[in-house]
Image (cartoon, rainbow, N blue to C red):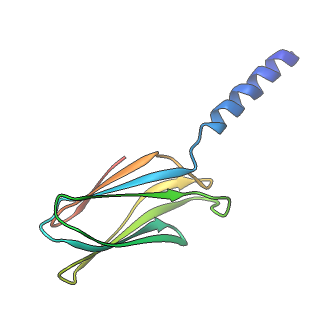
Amino acid sequence: MKIIKFILIAVFMGFTSCVSNEVSIIVENKSDKSINQINFGINGKSKSKSALFEPNETFNGKIIFDNDVVGDGNYFIELFFNDGSKKNKNFGYYTNGKPLNKSILLKVKNDTITIEY
């Protein structure tokens, strides 16, 4: 009986240790406009990247879930374009302070932002 308990605990610990504490954010600019700034993050924490991303260019970023992140929430992105326009989108989900995905691809189009997990 002790061996079965040990095996179950070892298997459980193995599964929980495989959970990553970061998620890659990939933004592809498939629109006709240049992006001046990208803000992205999770509830209460954000990152900002100010650079010019021309049409058909890609941005790669990461969100790291540290010990301060607890509970459940979602991701957000704000895009600022060179013509002064702005797009916002809330998306995805994390639970118990951990991401459910290793990477998220956002495709910025002229009229929408599509998401692939």
Indicate whether 63 appears above or below 20.
below
Task: Count how many numbered circles sit on residues in the image.
Answer: 0
Task: Choose between 32 and 50: the one closer to the eye.
Answer: 50
The image position of residue 16, as x and y in percent, is 65, 38
Farthest right residue? 2
Q: Quadrant of residue 25?
A: bottom left
- What residue is at 50 percent from the left and 47 percent from the top? 100
Indicate whether 75 appears above or below 19.
below
Specify whether 28 is left or right of 47.
left
- What residue is at 22 percent from the left and 59 percent from the top? 57
Farthest front residue? 51
Q: Quadrant of residue 51?
A: bottom left
Indicate whether 113 appears above or below 5.
below
Farthest bottom residue? 84
Indicate whether 10 appears above or below 99.
above
Specify whether 21 is left or right of 76.
right
The image position of residue 13, as x and y in percent, is 71, 33
On-image quarter of the N terminus:
top right
The image position of residue 32, as x and y in percent, is 12, 67
The image position of residue 71, as x and y in percent, is 63, 59
- What residue is at 15 percent from the left and 66 percent from the top? 110
- What residue is at 74 percent from the left and 26 percent from the top? 10
Specify whether 18 is left or right of 24.
right
Q: Quadrant of residue 75?
A: bottom left
